[in-house]
Image (spheres, helix red, strand yellow):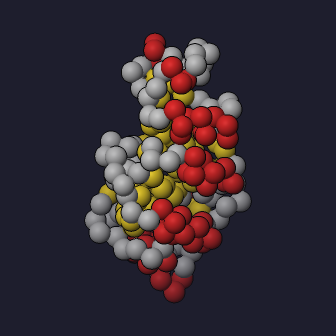
């Protein structure tokens, strides 16, 4: 297992602005084998119902612990609220409907990309799949929903921010943001 460093490049209370930044960054990335992963804390019956309508085979567990219910046990997730969602390897077109279904609940949506581009004029080499990720924290100021907030944060993942600072700053500029020094370790 390896880790990437997730560098915050945009924090905004405007979800449309955050999604625009994500779309811009996705437009730069190699998406040939890309997929999207979801981690969320669903607290409301409304959000859970909307997400289940979208993803009937959703993988979840009770936030109080798996012994209190999970998708594997066949329990009713509405009885187990709040629930933690960890569902992986979905097609990219599921990301925005999932985000829309959240309402005010928090989530981390991570796009697993095939690579960040080579940009010779900026001195940037190709970054391959191992360190090419993009995360949008929805209604949270961190990757893991430990800080629920009315804000949304866009992170770009790289091998090491110190070594890849030029790439972080280049991507941030394209996303309409800027790197302000917030970095989180992201186990992959």
Q: Residue 58, percent across and down?
A: 62, 32
Horizontal and vertical percent position of residue 164? 40, 67
Residue 149 location, x and y as percent?
34, 51
Residue at image position (55%, 23%) is: 77
The residue drawn where x is 50% and y is 48% is 103
In this rendering, is residue 173 above or below 41? below
Residue 135 or residue 63, whichever sits in front: 63
Residue furthest toward the front?
46
Whether residue 147 is situated above or below residue 170 in the rendered picture: above
Q: Is residue 85 left or right of residue 178?
A: right
Q: Check the image and name the residue furthest to the left.
A: 181
The image quadrant of residue 126 is bottom right
Q: Work out whether residue 75 can be spotted.
A: yes
Q: Is residue 8 above or below residue 95?
A: below
Q: Residue at x 42, y 26 (%)?
A: 63
Residue 159 showing in the rendered view: no
* Residue 43 position in % (x across, y down): 44, 34
175 or 156, which lies in front? 175
Q: Tell me which residue sits at (50%, 40%) in the image.
A: 39
* Residue positioned most to the bottom: 121
């Amino acid at each position: 297992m390896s880790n990437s460093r997730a560098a915050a490049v945009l924090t905004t209370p405007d979800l449309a602005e955050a999604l625009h930044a994500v779309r811009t960054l996705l437009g730069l990335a190699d998406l040939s084998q890309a997929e999207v992963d979801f981690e969320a804390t669903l607290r409301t019956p409304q959000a859970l119902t909307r997400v289940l309508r979208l993803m009937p085979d959703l993988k979840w567990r009770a936030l109080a612990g798996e012994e209190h219910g999970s998708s594997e046990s066949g329990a009713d997730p509405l009885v187990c609220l709040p629930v933690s969602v960890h569902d992986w390897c979905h097609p990219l077109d599921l990301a925005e409907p999932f985000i829309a279904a959240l309402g005010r609940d928090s989530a981390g949506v991570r796009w697993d990309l095939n690579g960040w581009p080579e940009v010779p004029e900026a001195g940037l080499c190709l970054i391959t799949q191992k360190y090419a990720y993009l995360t949008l924290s929805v209604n949270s100021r961190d990757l893991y929903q430990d800080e629920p907030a009315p804000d949304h944060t866009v992170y770009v993942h790289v091998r090491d921010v110190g070594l890849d600072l030029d790439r972080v700053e280049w991507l941030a500029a394209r996303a309409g943001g800027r790197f302000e020094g917030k970095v989180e370790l992201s186990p992959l």
